[in-house]
Amino acid sequence: MASEAHGAEEGGLVFHPMDQFIVKPLFGGDHIGLFTITNVTLWMAIAVLGIIAMMIMGTRSRAIVPSRSQSIAELAYGFIYKMVEDVAGKDAIKFFPYIMTLFMFIVFANFLGLIPMSFTTTSHFAVTVVLALLVFLTVTIVGFVKNGVGFLGLFWVSSAPLALRPILAIIELISYFVRPVSHSIRLAGNVMAGHAVIKVFAGFAAIAVVSPVSVIAITAMYGLEVLVAFIQAYVFTILTCVYLKDALHPSH
C-alpha cells in the first residue's frame, strides 16, 4: 500500500491498462524466440480447438433436432455463405471455406478475450497483420490469375474525365496497397481500445467513492465489448468479400 501511495504521489499509474497485452512465455524466462510457446500461442490454440469442437464434433451427428452447438454452427455457416454469395457473387462460393475460417477464428479469439485472465490474440498487430496480408495476397493473386493484365482495370476509372484518370489511378493504387494496413488496424485497434478502457475502470473500482460508478461503467463497457467482438469479426469478413469481388470483377 505504501509503495502504491508513493507511486501515486510520483504521478505514475498504480494500474497499467496495457499490461494485459504483454506477450509472455508460458514456461519461464523472459526471452521469446521463434519457437517459444507464449500466452498468444495458448489462446490461439484454444480458439482453434473451440472451432473444431463446435464445427466438427458438434455437428457430426446431424440430428433432426439440433443441439446447441449444431444450431450455432448451422447459423454461422448460413450467415457467412449468404454474405459471400450476396457481396462477392456466386463465383466466389469456392472461397467460402477460407472466408468461413477467417470469421470463425476472429470471432472465437474475440470472445475468448472477454474471459477474465485470458489473452486477446486479435488485439496484437502481429496477428491481425498476418490475417490482413493473407487476404491481400489471396485477392491479388486471384485477380491476376482470373483476369490477367485486365485486373489492372480496377485502378483505371473509365467513367472519369480522361485528364483525371491518371491521377485517380495513382490514388486507387495507393488505396489498394493501404488495404492491409486499415484492415488489420481496424480489428486490433478496436479490440485493444475496449479492453484498455475496461481495465482503466477496473482500476478505479478500488476507490470506495467512485466504485459504484466504476462497476456500472465496467458492466456497460463489457456489454459493448461483446457486441464489438462480433461486429469486428463481421467487418473484417465482409471487407474480405468486398476485396474478393474486386478481384473477380475488376471492371465493376
Image: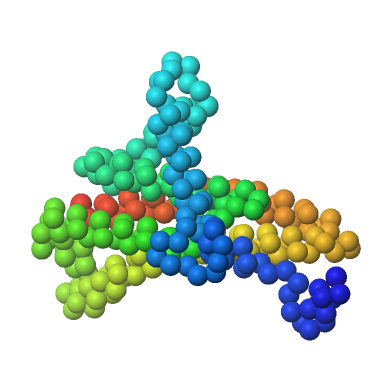
Q: Report whether 35 appears left or right of 147.
A: right
Quadrant showing the C terminus: bottom left
In the rendered picture of this protein, how many numbered marks are placed on residues?
A: 0
Q: Which residue is drawn at 50% across and 45% down?
A: 46
Toward the bottom, the furthest residue is 10
The answer to whether residue 250 is visible is no
Toward the right, the furthest residue is 209
Quadrant showing the N terminus: bottom right
Q: Residue at x 19, y 58 (%)?
A: 141
Q: Nearer the viewer, residue 61 or 211?
A: 61
* Residue 209: x %, y % from top left: 89, 63
Q: Which residue is drawn at 40% across and 31% down?
A: 56
Q: Report whether 94 appears left or right of 226.
A: left
Name the image quarter holding residue 175. Answer: bottom left
* Residue 142: x %, y % from top left: 19, 54
* Residue 75: x %, y % from top left: 44, 32
Toward the left, the furthest residue is 149
Q: Report whether 31 appears left or right of 140.
A: right
Toward the front, the furthest residue is 28
Q: Report whether 11 appears left or right of 31.
A: right
* Residue 105: x %, y % from top left: 43, 47
Name the image quarter holding residue 171. Answer: bottom left
Q: In this view, does 87 lie above or below 73?
A: below
Q: Nearer the viewer, residue 44 or 241?
A: 44
Q: In this view, does 23 lie above or below 88?
A: below
Q: Which residue is drawn at 54% across and 58% down?
A: 27
